[in-house]
Amino acid sequence: MKRFLPFAIATCILTGFAQATQSTPLQTPRDEATQTPEALLSLAIQSIGGRKQLNALSSFQLHGVMRLPDNRPVVEIELATQTGGKVLGVMTYLGIGQSRFGSDGVIAWEQNLGKDGKITWNIIDSKSLSQKVQQMNWLEWFTMLPTQLSDMKVVGSEEFDGEQCWIIQIEKKGEKEQLAFFSKKTHRPKGRRTVEKTNKGDVTVDIYFRDWERIEDLLLFHTVVFSRGNTTITLKLDRIALNKASDSLFALPTEVINLREKE
């Protein structure tokens, strides 16, 4: 299996990307004619702490709870990533059960609870693991954007979540089109928009990044709001830790070791 490096790859990409653009002092873009995805992403990286701070991360951990519009908690989320491709994610569906996924840097796996209450274990590929990580860690989504520069273009500006934002369209063959929004005032990533096709027509899905707080040398959002049609779900991150994850977190479960030996 190809080695998966979720946060390590992202920071290395950002380092190279920032170095490639630092020879010319960055200027705040003023009109659509001068917009480039490279410039907007560079400003966004600087706005949350800069490439040096991102590249200094050896591990990243978060804990949060997803709540319905009536504030009822429905899912507890825990995620840890470490350089070398190590991952551990846990989703606890309150009152129902738990699913987990992870990687020791070589083998990626998932553990799910079936409808009959039976637990299943599977070895998964790096793409599936990456998708799982990004669904829980939206900083991961943002830091991976430079890998898609060839599929990006600036398509204008509009108000998004109460702020005037530049819009980057991400259109990759075989994947759903995305719009990424960046604040004109702070340069921070404000969120993402996609459109889902349903039997009742297209439905807009917006994701908002809110409640920015400083964690050591980085400025990070602590609330993610998912808005789909007339429904909103809020993920509140109550704990973020940098460079504190233990290696023991990422040890392969016995069930995964047994699966690997059978292959």
Image (cartoon, rainbow, N blue to C red):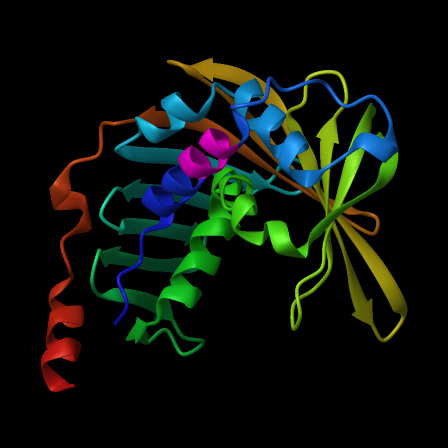
Count of numbered marks: 0
Q: Nearer the viewer, residue 111 or 25?
A: 25
User: x, y percentage for residue 110?
Assistant: 32, 66
Is 60 on the left-hand or right-hand side of 163? left
Q: Residue at x 29, y 50 (%)?
A: 88
Q: Residue furthest front?
A: 23
Is 163 on the left-hand or right-hand side of 110? right
In which quadrant of the rendered image does the C terminus lie?
bottom left
Whether residue 25 is visible, yes or no, is: yes
User: x, y percentage for residue 111?
Assistant: 31, 67
| Snapshot quadrant of residue 46 | top right
Q: Is residue 124 magenta?
A: no
Whether residue 161 is visible, yes or no, is: no
User: x, y percentage for residue 153?
Assistant: 75, 48
Q: Is residue 104 above or below residue 29?
A: below
User: x, y percentage for residue 193?
Assistant: 75, 48
| Region of the chain picked out in magenta, as a range | 14-20
